Amino acid sequence: LTYLGKGDIPEQHLGFLGKISQRYQPTFLDKGDIKTKPTHLVGSEGHFKDTTSQLIHNSPTPSPTMDLTPSAIPLAVHPTAAFTTLPPPSPPPPTTLPWPLSPLNPATRINSLTPVLNPHWRLDLCSSQGTQFHTIPLTLPLPPPLFITTTIPPPSAHPSLSHLLDFPQAFSRRGNSIQGLGIAQHVLRALEHYSATHPRFAETYRTLPFGSQIVISRLNKDVRKCHITLLRNTQLEHTLLNPSALAALAPEISAEAWPEALDITSMTLVRQIHDSVCVVALPHSESGKPQELVMKAVTGDPKYLYHELISLLHLPAHPNIIRPLYLATKKCGFGGKVGVVGMLLPFHRAGSLRDVLPLRSLTGTLAWTDQMRWAKGLADALVHVLRQGSYYSDLRVDNVVLAENGEAVLVDFEQRGVWAGFSAPEVACIENLAIIAMSAHGEVPEVVRAEYRAKMDRFLPGWRDVGRGAHKGRTEGFALGWLAMNAEEREAAMVYMLGRALWCIFEAVGMPERAVWRQGGEGGVEFPAYRRAGQRERELIDRCTKGRVEGRREQGVVRIGGRIVLKDGDGTESPEVVQRAAKEWWVEELERGERFLEEREIRREERRESGEVGGFSVFGGRPRLEEVLDILEGWECDV
């Protein structure tokens, strides 16, 4: 084979060479062949025949594994897996594609997935199961925090683009690591084209209602052909309350206790760090430099945000509990109402213990005195919440941030539940029933859904009304598993979560176990195994986590990258094998949970009949929160 230079080929034939690509099987030509125009490749007018439609692209066969996509959740992640079965596998896709459909055809391939050289957009993170991108236009001046996102269809809507653009991996990427995926760069390029071809886009963007969306309803390999529309979130504006109406929901809170209101137009968006949290800069400060704070907002139903805000204001200030500094407001487009869209909180730059623990362990900078300080601070914060007649339902190290003074600070008081990796097993029992009872149409047979709704009616009467309606002020929260418990049982569940958090702190691990939602098992250890914790720490953790169902079979499926695989497999299991393992595990888990709930009802009835009070040990034999705090303070004194 002789390599051809541009000068070796007649000008009229140069276009043909663009259609010959690596991994195809064209006819290789010698220089002399080009000059003599071989008849089998040359048409009647002396030009090369376009034979590219006959070329076959040998596409690599995609690995037949289960991707972590929205469609996989009811099949393998949620308890609905106990009642679902994968449909018969479809015939395998052809390993060869005609040239006009090949992703390597210059006429139809994706032009580029590299970052734009001088971008007008930035992408901070991804949420909503990999379909919502938190994109920010880099116009000057930078926009205020409007919480405008870019949404795309789920991977199932564009199967041919799914793996070309790394769709499945978007679900599981944390923070700005999403920027390395093809789908992220494709979305950014589509936005570059859209904003450049729409006059006055920057002005339009700033006037959109809070929480609006840029909707890419149809993706295309050619970003110029992506179908993009603006979805104005006018519904949110109708449901927002102004500061006075919000304060009227909690008249027991004095006017002086309510934070000052700041309009979001006085702020600049710095970066998005969570789907509901961003960093903003305020122009005024004593030093003359912009002051950076965290803004927590909501783009759906604002009652959850209002509930959290009121709950925090009900609590007397505590060094280990986050405190609202300002209300974030925005003037609505209709009627001139100034609605509360969020709250401003201190910005703790060190981040959460989820990241601090493994990082300090890796760098050898994790001191036992720090671990003790964080453990005691968490226990003290929970005791403080309990003494005010409330409860904290979302204790995980993701929700513990590290303040500048080294204190561990609790955040997130929405009371909407906790991940299974930290949740007490008695809480998960109700939550699992609720997921099936509230499953989408078609996820489980209708007779199963009706059966589980009846079970929920028995174990938690009134569950259907939780979260319904508009603003209710302070409530008991929205987590069904917690609403099904009395005050004593809630404290026991808080102790369990504290035990899990203590395990993370003393083992220097950010996630207690591998699961489908998050990859744990850092450093080769998973709860309840131990590697670093001392004997007395282990004994306390074991006491706090009593009732964790000893001998319970571990969940058989976990996440590796963007795939769901068997925990003890080699990572190449088929979707059928993964779904079967998930189904078997969930059948056992649901049966175990229902037995527990039945036994709990019997014990409750026995206690009511006997007039027994107290008896904390009947729900796991865990210590009280104050006892845990006393133990930790005793250790601190020993030092």
Image: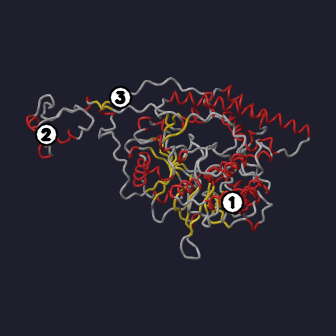
196 or 448: nearer the viewer:
448
**292 horizontally vs 225: left or right:** right
What quarter of the picture does the C terminus occupy? bottom right
As rendered, which of 373 and 111 lies closer to the eye? 373
Scheme by which the image is coloured: secondary structure
Task: State the image coordinates of residue 118 (x, y, percent, origin top left).
Answer: 37, 59
Mark 1 crowdedness (10 Å alpha carbons): few <14, some 14-19, many ≥20: many
For marks 3 and 2 on the same chain, the one whose residue lies earlier in the sequence: 2
Where residue 2 is drawn, which disc sits there? 2
Give the amino acid type for the residue marked by disc 1 in the picture. Gly
Disc 3 crowd rating (10 Å Cα; few below 14, some 14-19, many 20+) is few
Relative to 111, 564 lies left or right? right
- The quarter in which the N terminus is drawn is top left
Q: Mark 3 to mark 2: distance in Å?
A: 30 Å
Residue 329 visible in the displayed image = no
356 in relation to 289, above or below:
above
Which numbered marker is on residue 95?
Answer: 3
**From the viewer's perspective, is the residue at label 2 or at label 1 nearer?**
1
Q: Amino acid at mark 2?
A: Thr
Q: Which residue is at a point 78% across and 45% down the rendered structure image? A: 489
In this figure, what is the number of numbered marks?
Answer: 3
Kind of element beneath mark 3: loop
Q: Amino acid at mark 3?
A: Thr
Q: Residue at x 72, y 44 (%)?
A: 468
Counting residues from the start of the chain, the first of labels 3 and 1 encountered is 3
Camera sees residue 61: yes
Side of 372 relative to 488 (left or right): left
Disc 2 crowd, CA 10 A, few/some/many (<14, 14-19, 20+): few
**Gap between marks 3 and 1 measured at Cα:** 58 Å
Looking at the picture, how far across and down is residue 481, in whole percent?
A: 72, 42
- The answer to whether residue 152 is above or below residue 356 is above
**Percent x, y of residue 68:** 51, 38
